[in-house]
Amino acid sequence: MLKKTKILFVVPDLYSGGAQRVFMNLVKGFSRELFDITLVTLIRPSNEHFNKLLPADISLVQYNFTKTSHAFRALISLIRRENPGIVFSTLTHLNVILAMVRFFVSKKVLFVARESNTISSSLKDEKFPSLFRFLYKRLYKNFDLIICQSKAMADDLIANFNINPSVIKVIYNPIDIAHISASTTGLTSGLNSDNKRIELLGVGRLSNQKGFDRLLRIISLLSHLPLRLRIIGDGPLRDDLVRLASALHVNDRVEFLGLQENPFQFMAMSDCLLLSSYYEGLPNVVLEANACGLPVIAFNSPGGTAEIIEEGLNGWLIPDGDLEQFARKIESKEYLAINKNETVKFVTERFSLGKIILEYERAILSLSVRSND
């Protein structure tokens, strides 16, 4: 009988973003015949929605820290006690912590990081960018494998952080087509009663990275166009964005919906997703929207967005920062003529959960084999 590889999936929380949804999909999809899986969450949950989605056969270790950095000693104790073959983490700050943790545990434990952003760009939003640049350069070398969501992200680590290309593997994000389809079953008409109004959607954390400030400015350029923009998500800039919407006189056409347990119903009922990020790793929201048949207009900002958008098939790329061209693309209404079935087919063939799960499993099992040689 094949011996299972014991793996700890470590994530800050399960409720605040696309990286967490991807991690949940990986946990749910990894083979139970090949892996003995434990999920570890560190931050006190604000709700139990995602916990309810966790399969019953997955062990859950749930801490109640207020910050990821507070979990340093607890992670050392946990890894020593559980003695896993693999520790697999995601999100940059947590990856840095686990790169330090490995100094205090058995050298037989292999550490895998899933990088979630283009680090050179994300450093601009750090309080101490020089410190974090040093930490990334010094500590990311400690990982046995770094999984990047895009080629752009991998190139950034190699060129700017001196990471050996041999430890980097590019694997795109998976999307759970079956779950998304089930979440949108029975929806046959828009979420508005005014069929003449264009329904636009923005999804993401209300933080500087996601660029909702420039999305509101784009909407302000379209005062002559009947439209509604719904924004799903929450974050530290919510109040600032509400004030900006008012200052730009678009508050009557913009709705801040907060976090939604089922964002896919809004995707299925919208005409176009708008992605205004200043940078991305690989925007999972693009794939999720496409799985609902929803095309995307996105800035060609640093990161992997350009790697997953085929012009006119599942979306359009706009030169980064060109608000007027972005507005003109919305005004063109090309997205109303998109073939939704072809859009769904495009992402299903390239990013289906089963396909991507196999790529992850092969990468991790190959790492285990090499370590035993």
Image: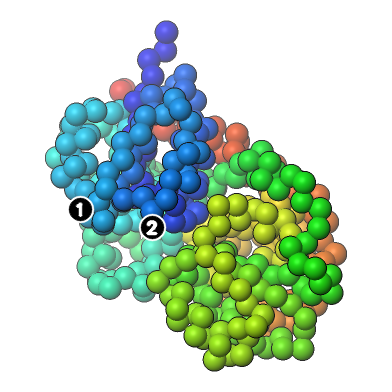
Mark 2 is on which residue type? Leu
Look at the picture and state if 198 lies above or below 141.
Answer: below
Which is nearer the eye, 73 or 116? 73
Q: How many marks on residues? A: 2
Front in this rendered view, residue 129 or 296: 296
Q: Which mark is residue 6?
A: none
* CB atoms of marks 1 and 2 within 8 Å: no
Q: In the shown orientation, is residue 70 left or right of residue 318?
A: left
The x, y position of residue 323, in whole percent, is 62, 83
Q: Amino acid at mark 1?
A: His
Residue at 45 percent of width and 27 percent of height: 56
Name the residue: 72% across, 56% down.
268
Find numbered disc 1 in the image and state the secondary structure of the residue it sits on. Answer: helix
- Quadrant location of residue 328? bottom right
| Mark 1, other Cα within 10 Å: few <14 / some 14–19 / many ≥20 | some
Q: Return the x and y of residue 67 as percentages of the image width and height.
A: 26, 57
Q: Is residue 249 or residue 30 the one in the foreground?
A: 249
Would residue 53 appear left or right of 236 to someone viewing this image? right
Q: CA distance from mark 1 to mark 2?
A: 26 Å
Mark 2: give few (<14), some (14-19) or many (20+) Cα within 10 Å. Answer: many
> Disc 2 marks which residue?
157
Mark 1 sits on what residue? 70
Horizontal side, residue 320 vs residue 135: left or right? right
Q: Earlier in the sequence, mark 1 or mark 2?
A: 1
Q: Point out the image quarter for the N terminus.
A: top left
Query: Which-is-in-front pick, marks 1 and 2?
Result: 1
Query: What is the x, y in percent for residue 271?
Result: 75, 65
Residue found 52% across the figure and 32% down from its top: 29
